[in-house]
Amino acid sequence: MLSTAFNWIIAHPTEFNRALGQHLLMSAVSMVFALIISLPLAVLIVNRSNLAFGVINIINALRTIPSLAILAIMMPLLGIGLWPSIVALTVLAMPPILLNAYVGLRDVDPDAVEAALGMGMNRGQVLRKIRIPLAAPAMFAGARTAAVQVLAGATLAPFIGGGGLGDFIAVGISMMDMSRLLVGAVPIALLALGTEFGLGLVEKIFFSERNTA
Amino acid sequence: MEATWQHLLLSVSSVLIGLVIALVLGILCARRPKLYSIVLTITGIIFVIPSLALFALLIPLLGLGFKPALVGLSSYCLLILLRNVVTGLRGVPAEVLDAADGMGYNGWQRLTRIELPLALPLIVSGIRIALVTVIGIATVAAFIDGGGLGTIILMGIDQSYPEKILVGGILTALLATFFDLVLGQAEKAMVRWR
């Protein structure tokens, strides 16, 4: 069955590449949007506890809504196609990025902040030179979790007309065609695993010295 | 209503199956770091595979319906449950274990009377996280005829009926929040009782 699936990919390279491209494109665009929205938001709320309380609660409530529902509800709101999926995936990616960045920024060693203030840095400088660099590992870990979630969420995009590798799974289920099922499932699984371990490696290389210190 | 029950049945039974496996593995691994890291890697790999892909991989083996959904969801919660079981068992202080040995407990007695009760709060916290995660993912089971609240969401997509999508999504969210709160309280009560 696996070899049938592999042969299908060889025989239909354009179809496969298009789906793979769509999958990667919508995941990447959503990740960029989620980062652009979440990181500044985390910086904004870290020194304003009232605001933080509200935002964190909204985000936590958002997390309990299943990804399928978030994707599905975009269809009546925004129609079908790639954009509704991108919006939904952005919403999916925000909680881990925002929560990790917020906790990372908040839990920076107060001694370090005080030392910086003592050296005459103003609030903006403390943020840029102390808080953000020290919170970078937590931010990265959040982005890694989000990336894997987005890739998984993108699998559900075909059900709202968003395309991607999940298309093959949808077709495979409706035709009960096992090899077509695998054409979607195996690359998706490999993609998610590759992202998880690849980004894990990057995390280790860039942030390990700071973690041990 | 029926879909809600189905959803609940699917989620709770997957977590229970996962728990039994995680307990066995956890007890085996708690004092064997090498075995633990192997098992952790395997369960970690399962956890990373997107739910729909995992279900799709199970269809050739198990067909459509409740069974592959159950297997898929149980394997999902393994990582969460296992981590908490092992952390809980490892957290039992060495003096307590020595005292149990000194009182003449054999391995099984020590496990059931000392180690598991002391690890219980962490195990319950694992069950809470696993159940909340599985309740969310179980919506995807509708694609493989596993039933549950995802069926309502799918119907909403097919009939372009946004209210159905909202009902399915909100009921799932409420279910997850409810169990989060209840098991969170149970956890607190257990710690206080100690």
Image (cartoon, coloured by chain):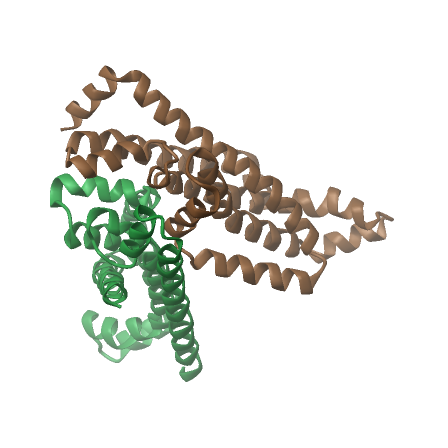
Chain colours: A brown, B green
| Residue A40 horizontal side relative to residue A10, left or right | right
| Residue B190 horizontal side relative to residue A45, left or right | left
**Looking at the image, is A51 positioned above or below residue A77?**
below
Residue A205, image x and y in percent? Answer: 52, 33
Residue B169, image x and y in percent? Answer: 38, 58
Which quadrant does the C terminus of chain B fall into?
A: bottom left
In this orientation, which residue lies closer to the viewer: A138 or B150? B150
Q: Residue at x 26, y 32 (%)?
A: A168
Residue A49, image x and y in percent? Answer: 68, 63
Residue B31 visible to the viewer: no
Residue B22 placement: quadrant: bottom left
Label total for image: 0
Residue A119, image x and y in percent? Answer: 85, 48
**Looking at the image, is A86 positioned above or below residue A68?**
above
Q: Residue furthest right?
A: A120
Q: Residue at x 40, y 84 (%)?
A: B193
Residue A192 visible to the viewer: yes
In this orientation, which residue lies closer to the viewer: A17 or B72? A17
| Residue A100 horizontal side relative to residue A7, left or right | right
Which quadrant does the N terminus of chain B fall into?
A: bottom left
In this orientation, which residue lies closer to the viewer: B20 or A87? A87
| Residue A11 horizontal side relative to residue A22, left or right | left
**Looking at the image, is A194 positioned above or below residue B23?**
above
